Amino acid sequence: MKTNMGTLDRVVRILLSVGIALLYATGILSGTWAIIAGMIAVIFLLTSLIGFCPLYRLVGMTTCKRKT
């Protein structure tokens, strides 16, 4: 897998994951919405840690700087 996520994209995804975790921990998110948000948070966290987003590849997008 070739990295297709830039640093800013990765940081934003990690921050969103932490935010969702905080919402869950404080009880603001509960029930079905908590499960859905939790799944999104896990996906964001995993893709940011490996630097590869399968959806970006499908649409031919990249947020990392190109090496010339």
Image (spheres, rainbow, N blue to C red):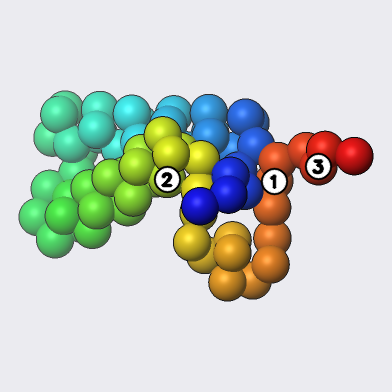
Between circles 1 and 3, the one closer to the viewer is 3
Which residue is drawn at the image coordinates 18% and 50% (left, top)?
A: 34
Instruction: Write down the quadrant of residue 7 in the picture.
Output: top right
Q: Which residue is mark 1?
A: 63
Determine contact: label 3, label 2, CB under 8 Å: no
Q: Residues within 10 Å of mark 1 (few under 14, many from 20)?
A: some
Locate residue 57, reporting x and y percent: 59, 64
Which residue is drawn at the image coordinates 36% and 39% (left, top)?
A: 45
Locate residue 26, reporting x and y percent: 16, 27
Question: Which residue is farthest right?
Answer: 68
Q: Which residue is mark 3?
A: 66
Residue 24 visible? yes
Which residue is drawn at the image coordinates 69% and 52% (left, top)?
A: 62
- Is residue 27 or residue 39 the one in the foreground? 39
- Is residue 67 or residue 15 the one in the foreground? 67
Q: Marks 3 and 2, how far apart in space?
A: 19 Å
Going by the numbered disc 1, the residue's amino acid type is Thr
Going by the numbered disc 2, the residue's amino acid type is Thr
